[in-house]
Amino acid sequence: MSRTNRPPITLRDIMSMAGTAVRDETKKDYIVTVVGTVLDDPTLTTVPAMNVCALRFSDKALERILQAGGNVYTFDQLAQMRPTGSKTILLRGRITARKAHRYFGKAGVPNSHTRPRTLSSGVKFERSRGRRPGKGFRN
């Protein structure tokens, strides 16, 4: 799978997307599945005990999940535990967060937020006419 389709996800995103499956005591047997990397969120003060399966974990995210009493699994372990995929929640991070995603579309068109493909980054290169107030297109 390409790296575009394996975006990272933070612990805060897992908590907000998985919802009650992470926080509710009656749903502790659910496993959050991420095809990508799980990263730590330093602004998150407490991490609940949760079961997470992912391709990779950052060191701090792994430490915080295990310290909270949660479990981490690989996809091999998940396939043995839940061969049908029952009681799993499949999540992924934001694909559009990558800088490379900004280059798709027509650059230079009015109201387009596409980044122009240029090596020069000065004020007079792709940043002047039509991009700033007072520097509009002239007839």
Image (tube, rainbow, N blue to C red):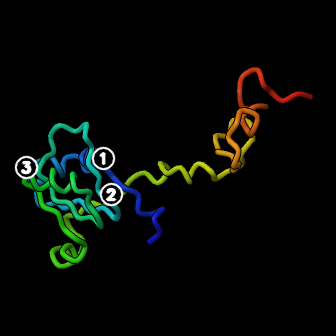
x and y percent of residue 97 in the render? 47, 48
Q: Amino acid at mark 1?
A: Asp
Q: Image point 17% across, 37% down: which residue? A: 45
The C terminus appears in which quarter of the rendering? top right
Q: Residue at x 41, y 58 (%)?
A: 7
Q: Is 41 placed above or below 7 here?
A: above
Frontmost residue, 116 versus 32: 116
Whether tag 1 and tag 2 are in contact, CB under 8 A, the answer is yes
Q: Which mark is residue 25?
A: 3
User: Which image quarter: residue 62?
Assistant: bottom left
The circle on residue 13 is 1
User: How many numbered marks appear?
Assistant: 3
Quadrant housing the N terminus = bottom left
Snapshot quadrant of residue 66: bottom left
Question: The residue under label 2 is which amino acid type?
Answer: Leu
Q: Amino acid at mark 3?
A: Glu
Kindly report the distance in space between the C-alpha atoms of the residues bearing marks 2 and 3.
20 Å
x 47%, y 69%: residue: 2
Residue farthest to the top? 134
Q: Quadrant of residue 125?
A: top right
Q: In percent of the image, x 74 and y 39: which residue is there?
A: 126
The residue pinned by badge 2 equals 91
What whole-number distance in Å separates the C-alpha atoms at marks 1 and 3? Answer: 19 Å
Local secondary structure at mark 1: helix
Where residue 132 appears, x then y in whole percent? 71, 27
Depicted 129 relative to depicted 61: above or below: above
Tell me if mark 1 has few (under 14), some (14-19) or many (20+) residues whose alpha carbon lies within 10 angstroms of its own. Answer: some
Query: CA gap, disc 1 to disc 2?
Result: 9 Å
Which tag, 1 or 3, sits closer to the chain's start? Answer: 1
Of tags 1 and 3, the one toward the viewer is 1
SS at mark 2 in the image:
strand
